[in-house]
């Protein structure tokens, strides 16, 4: 890895500056898992109130549990680990960081409750708490990102994602206000679609691209991608998502071109994945097979390809009952199949790395903890992967076809998968933080 000139000029910091915050990432991860479990529990117990046209209060509550509670919460927590360990970006936890987490958790829970009980008048303050927390984390990361000794291929999409997160959060507040008092001057549903895609593509997907260029070489392992196509993926995605927002605010003009730019950006990203697969490095000998982290990432990318196909169809097709059904499957494949599952795959590698770092510190850096490759509950990981593999297509089909029993059963399987992931993460922490001989 060749640092940029900016990173070469960065002041040297002691190794302890790059030890991740101990408890803050775990608070974000715990809240994120609870949010996803709550979303799936709602699908298990009340599927009849959630099928059909997606824009109704209870489905919006479930969607925000997934997008804000689970995906955004997991990313925010991961930044406090990836920043120090992978990007060499110091992010010590301060009192304000815990206040930001509290603001985020209260805001997400408030939004979900107001959606569920269809109380739009109280939505804006909840969205404001979430936006304030995100703005604080973004400001901390952006202030150090330019000088971080990480490749531009990773820093560029991460920086764009953080800016898009702020814009999406602000737009979300305006959409909440617009529900009660129209202020945006466009159809409310168009504003919702603009907000949703800015959040899912501009924030979630661009962050996956940036972190992926730094973390996926560790997950596989492989050489690190660089050069024109790695940079082009971020530029094309950013241009495409801004085009989508402009199209929805402009009466649909430019929607096809914006979609094409997003697809081109995703294809560029996928081409770098192929490049990484062609430039593999030897994996640690103690890593068990099959590698469930890699399997989750592969399955997530397959869901991304399927979601891209459905998204292109939706951009070109005239609205009909068929497009409504396809939209439900598109949402499941994009939000749960791709974004959620790639979070699961990356966490499967990130949590042991984080726990090992603190286990080594707890031993005064004089005694090695157990190998991070052998502490996961292998059977639980395999069970989780199998349930994700079956549950995602089943849930996508169930929501598209309005099959209530299938929605409930698929969600129950995914709920069990998430619970297995949570138990496995707890075991990893216990095994790596516990002193040998204690």
Image: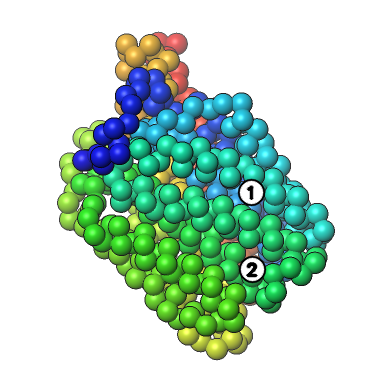
Looking at the figure, which quarter contains the C terminus?
A: top left
Residue pointed to by mark 1? 131
Q: What separation in Å lies between label 1 and label 2 (alpha carbons)?
A: 16 Å
Q: Which mark is residue 192?
A: 2
Up-down relation of residue 396 to residue 421 (above or below): below
Whether residue 342 is visible: no
- In the image, residue 277 sits, relative to residue 30, either above or below, namely below
Residue in the picture at 80% in, 67% down: 181
- Along the line of sight, which residue is nearer the eye, 276 or 259? 259
Q: Is residue 54 above or below residue 120?
A: below
Please tell me which residue is depicted at 69% across the width and 45% down the height of the picture.
129
User: Is there a contact, CB below 8 Å, between mark 1 and mark 2?
Assistant: no
One can see residue 136 in this view: yes
Q: Which mark is residue 388?
A: none
Q: What secondary structure is marked by label 2?
A: helix
Q: Position of residue 243 (x, y in %)?
A: 48, 72
In depth, the one of 336 and 208 nearer the eye is 208
Q: Earlier in the sequence, mark 1 or mark 2?
A: 1
Residue 257: percent from left, percent from top:
42, 79
- Quadrant of res 399: bottom right
């Amino acid at each position: 890895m060749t640092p940029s000139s900016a990173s070469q000029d960065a002041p040297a910091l002691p190794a302890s500056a790059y030890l991740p915050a101990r408890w803050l990432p775990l608070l974000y991860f715990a809240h994120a898992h609870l949010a996803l479990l709550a979303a799936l529990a709602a699908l298990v117990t009340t599927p009849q109130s959630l099928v059909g046209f997606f824009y109704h209060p209870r489905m919006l509550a479930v969607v925000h549990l997934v997008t804000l509670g689970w995906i955004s919460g997991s990313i925010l927590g991961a930044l406090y680990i990836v920043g120090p360990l992978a990007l060499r970006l110091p992010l010590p936890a301060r009192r304000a960081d815990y206040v930001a987490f509290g603001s985020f958790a209260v805001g997400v829970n408030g939004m979900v409750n107001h959606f569920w009980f269809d109380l739009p008048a109280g939505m804006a303050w909840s969205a404001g708490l979430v936006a304030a927390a995100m703005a604080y984390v973004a400001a901390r990361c952006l202030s150090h990102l330019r000088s971080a000794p990480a490749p531009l291929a990773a820093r560029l999409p991460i920086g764009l994602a953080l800016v898009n997160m702020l814009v999406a959060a602000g737009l979300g507040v305006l959409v909440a206000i617009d529900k009660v008092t129209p202020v945006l001057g466009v159809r409310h549903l168009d504003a919702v679609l603009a907000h949703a895609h800015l959040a899912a593509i501009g924030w979630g997907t661009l962050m996956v691209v940036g972190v992926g260029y730094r973390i996926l070489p560790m997950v596989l392992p492989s050489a690190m991608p660089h050069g024109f196509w790695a940079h082009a993926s971020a530029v094309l995605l950013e241009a495409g998502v801004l085009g989508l927002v402009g199209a929805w605010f402009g009466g649909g003009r430019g929607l096809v071109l914006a979609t094409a730019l997003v697809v081109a950006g995703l294809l560029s990203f996928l081409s770098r994945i192929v490049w990484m697969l062609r430039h593999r490095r030897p994996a640690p000998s103690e890593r068990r097979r099959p590698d469930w982290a890699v399997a989750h990432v592969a399955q997530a990318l397959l869901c991304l390809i399927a979601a891209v196909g459905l998204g292109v169809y939706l951009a070109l097709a005239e609205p009909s009952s068929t497009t409504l059904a396809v939209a439900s499957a598109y949402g499941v494949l994009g939000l749960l199949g791709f974004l959620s599952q790639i979070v699961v795959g990356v966490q499967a590698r990130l949590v042991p790395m984080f726990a090992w770092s603190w286990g080594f510190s707890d031993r005064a850096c004089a005694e090695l903890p157990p190998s991070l490759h052998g502490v996961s509950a292998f059977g639980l990981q395999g069970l989780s992967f199998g349930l994700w593999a079956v549950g995602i297509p089943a849930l996508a089909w169930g929501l598209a076809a309005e099959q209530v029993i299938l929605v409930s059963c698929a969600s129950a399987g995914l709920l069990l998968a998430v619970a297995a992931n949570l138990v496995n993460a707890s075991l990893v922490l216990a095994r790596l933080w516990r002193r040998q001989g204690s």
